[in-house]
Amino acid sequence: MSKMNPQVGKVQIGIREKDIEILELYPLSIANQLEMSALIQTAMQKFFGISTINSELDEVNSVDSFEKAPDKQDDMEFISFIIELIRENITKILSFITDYSTEQKAAKLLFKITNNQAVDICSLIYAMNYEESAKNAIGLFKKATGSLQEIAPKTSLKRPLPSSLKSTPNSGSSISSNLVTEK
């Protein structure tokens, strides 16, 4: 049995030509994706001042603050916030996707990567871990809904009305809500 991972990406990193090296990037595990999602969610909550984003039972104030938050924050504040988020977590992310398995080891990479190379790495992380998965999930959803429609045609998916609510033929009479009287 051969071992191979077709999702391994390779990028060139280095500041000076003599220091150029190839860095292998591995796909995120599900556990790492969940951790990254939680990290991003926590950061967004902090930025927008929301107690929880994914609970529909939040106070109206929290929902209002989420909807109004972009108006409160200017572009520079948001950019500063994103830079701080990356600064605080870049070694953790690099430890997830490289052979530098600890944050201390991954920190050494920061001396070898330029800003442009960091953007290329981010693009590759997205393409490897999210882009194709999203396409596959959409395809799976379409396939599943198509299968359900073949099993049960659209008309049979509607629940029948109870007999007390079934429509009756039009008798030509009209009732106005203005005619309702109080007792």
Image (cartoon, helix red, strand yellow):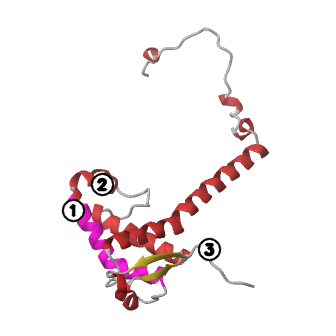
Name the residue type under label 3.
Answer: Pro
What residue would you read off at disc 3?
A: 6
Residue drawn at point x = 41 percent, y = 69 percent: 120
What residue would you read off at disc 2?
A: 61
Question: Real-space Cα distance between discs 1 and 3?
Answer: 39 Å
In the image as oriented, which residue stretches furthest toward the front? 18
The quadrant the C terminus occupies is top left
Which residues fall within the magenta stretch? 76-98
| Mark 3 closeness class: few <14, some 14–19, many ≥20 residues within 10 Å | few
Q: Tag 2 or tag 1, which sits nearer the N-term?
A: 2
Front label number (1 vs 2): 1
Q: Tag 3 or tag 1, which sits nearer the N-term?
A: 3
Front label number (2 vs 3): 3
Asked whether the residues under the numbered discs 1 and 2 touch, taking CB atoms below 8 Å apart as contact, a structural biologist would say: no
The quadrant the N terminus occupies is bottom right
Residue drawn at point x = 64 percent, y = 54 percent: 139
Q: From this view, report whether residue 170 is shown above or below residue 130.
A: above
Left or right: residue 45 compared with residue 125: left
For residue 77, the mark is 1
Residue drawn at point x = 44 percent, y = 73 percent: 36
| Mark 1 closeness class: few <14, some 14–19, many ≥20 residues within 10 Å | few
